[in-house]
Image (cartoon, rainbow, N blue to C red):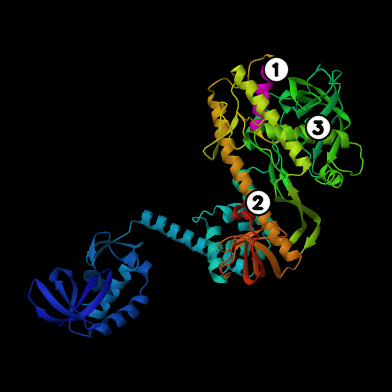
Amino acid sequence: MFVLYEEDGAFKAGTILTDNQATLQVENTHGKRVKLKRANVLLDFREPGPADLLSRAEAAAEELDTEFLWEVCGDDEFAFADFAAEYQGHPPTAVESAAILLRLHSAPIWFHRKGKGRFRKAPADILQAALAGLEKKRQQAAAIEHMRSELVDGRLPPELAALLPQALYRPDRNRNEVKALEAACVDTGLSAARLLLKCGALGSSYDFHYNRFLFEHFPEGADFPGFAPAALPPDLPRADVAAFSIDDASTTEIDDAFSIVPRAEGGWRIGIHIAAPALGFSRGTELDAIARRRLSTVYMPGGKITMLPDEVVQAFTLSEGRDCPAVSLYLDISPGLAIVGEESRVEMVPIVANLRHHDLEPLFNDETVHGDGPDFRWKHELTLLWDLATVLEAGRGKAGGNEDRIDFGFSVDWARDTADGPGFVSIARRLRGSPMDKLVAELMIHANVTWGRLLDEAGVPGLYRAQGGGKVRMTTVAAPHEGLGVECYAWSSSPLRRYVDLVNQWQIISVLQDTTPAFAPKSADLMAALRDFELTYAEYAEFQRGMERYWCLRWLRQHGRGEVEGTVLRENVVRLSEIPLVFKVPSMPLQLPGSRVRLAVEHTDLLDIEVEAHFLRTLSEPAQRDESQAADAFGPL
């Protein structure tokens, strides 16, 4: 005697070994013995054998028309065996009954299960809705398959093109387009970025990284919304100076300039002039909303996304040949370079020259600053500022020689194409702490300290950088900055580029003009601006570092560098000599920090921004000096 029963959602058949009325001991078709309750048995039969029954019933079930079964069965609940007898018109065989059971069980949309071996036909309205849903799923599956096939063949489906940024950077896995993309990635063995690059959805690997940044931080694009134009302030006094700026060749947001006027009693009156966009628009305006949203200019090799619209930048940048609104700090200097007086003013400043690093550095450097170097138009002014900067540095307790660290400058020629896409990168090296660097840095530090103290003494809140116990933080109250050796430090010298500086400039102007500050003490908006700036500024800086790393890999490819030299920073971490690229070399044996090594570049990945190299040999071991200096000579990681 044999039985048909259900176990774990599947139908099985077996031979009865022991019948205890309420329970059965059965051996299934695989030789396994199971104990069954009599109530769980669906069908008793004598022929055919258990294995034969299941195979024949499955074949017979395939020939049954589900829709016809639905039409001929009644509306009431029924047992499958009773329906089999009605359908066949005679007492059904075990195979015929099992076939009906299998077909009913396999069509849950048409027949709702009501218990073991019992069913009820689905109501017509529910059935139609279910069939419509099934058809929709079928069409979706067909669409997914079509898009998958197109992607595998290297073509971008238009449906995916319309959803590209979201599918690539923040995929919604419930969407058909994303399901197709993921399926194609599995079939091709490629990541989504590599597959879309292959399909032409991305112009280059650069587009992948740049567009991701825009997607995350500028979802509406990098273009500026509409705004009321900034208004140049009328009736500002004109300074009787001839100011000049010092910047690199790519700088368009010229924030600072300097002037020198001899004093009748001896010494000089030195002016530090900061561009004043805060005079052109106020808090709460459309331009303020734009600056508040962006919080900083975004820098990257080969480009930037400015905090303020170009029209505003051009109106307030300290361009040569015109008078520019500025907040000025004047230092009265004795012949011995002691500061004997200070004055801050809001005024129009004549800018007579925009000096550039690449023009000045061959003429004004460590060797020529006090030597017999060539004479040039601005030598006297720069030398005087350098001497003053040295005194200011010593006053902070930071006097010393120039820093032995390298800065790297990136420039990208977008008119030149390479195998990796548009853009030919050049990377230049320059020693940090040059006379020009120091004189600009020290005068800016002094201005930021002076104006921070001005706000504090006036009881007007500002945004300060503070450092204590090795930790740097931002605060709305004046606090010491131990790293700089100053009592307070309020960023105020780059209002065209940073929202913090713009906020501080509004506050400074309110003190100088005796007007109501833009932000009151304990302002919640000021605290929110501080918090948002810190987070955003860190994210922008991380993006800049990532893009510099990307262009370093492009540089390696452009120059075909199969072998490179570098300096060991720690364990298996190496910084290359020619470019600021740091990476791990797992194959390198233990080296002293500062050792020079030669490596073979095996692979560079422009999407993951990774480089693989193996160790070739040690070129030299470090000289006898502090190991931290050896690492720091190449800048921080």
**Marks 1 and 3, Cα distance to the nearest angstrom?**
21 Å
Q: Residue furthest left?
A: 20
**Marks 2 and 3, Cα distance to the nearest angstrom?**
31 Å
Asked whether residue 365 appears in the rendered view, the answer is: yes
The question of residue 349 being in magenta is answered with no
Pointer 1 or 3: first along the chain: 3
Q: Position of residue 566 (x, y in %)?
A: 67, 63
Mark closer to the observer (2, 3): 2
What's the magenta region?
A: 500-512
Residue indicated by mark 3: 318
Secondary element type, mark 2: loop
Q: Which mark is residue 374?
A: none
10 Å crowding of disc 2: few (<14), some (14-19), many (20+): some
Mark closer to the observer (2, 1): 2
Relative to the observer, which residue lies in front, 153 or 252?
Answer: 252
Q: Residue furthest front?
A: 624
556 relative position to 614: left or right:
right
Asked whether residue 202 appears in the rendered view, the answer is: no
160 relative position to 239: left or right:
left
- Say which amino acid is labelled 3: Leu
Residue indicated by mark 1: 512
Q: Is the N terminus in the top left, top right, bottom left or bottom right quadrant?
A: bottom left
Secondary element type, mark 1: helix
In the displayed structure, 601 sits above or below 332; it is: below
- Residue pictured at 63% horizontal, 69% vertical: 613
Please identify the dominant SS of the magenta region.
helix
Q: Position of residue 465 (x, y in %)?
A: 59, 33
Q: Which mark is residue 635?
A: 2
Circle 1/circle 3 CB separation < 8 Å: no
Relative to the observer, which residue lies in front, 44 or 314?
Answer: 314
- Say which amino acid is labelled 1: Leu
Relative to the observer, which residue lies in front, 163 or 429?
Answer: 429
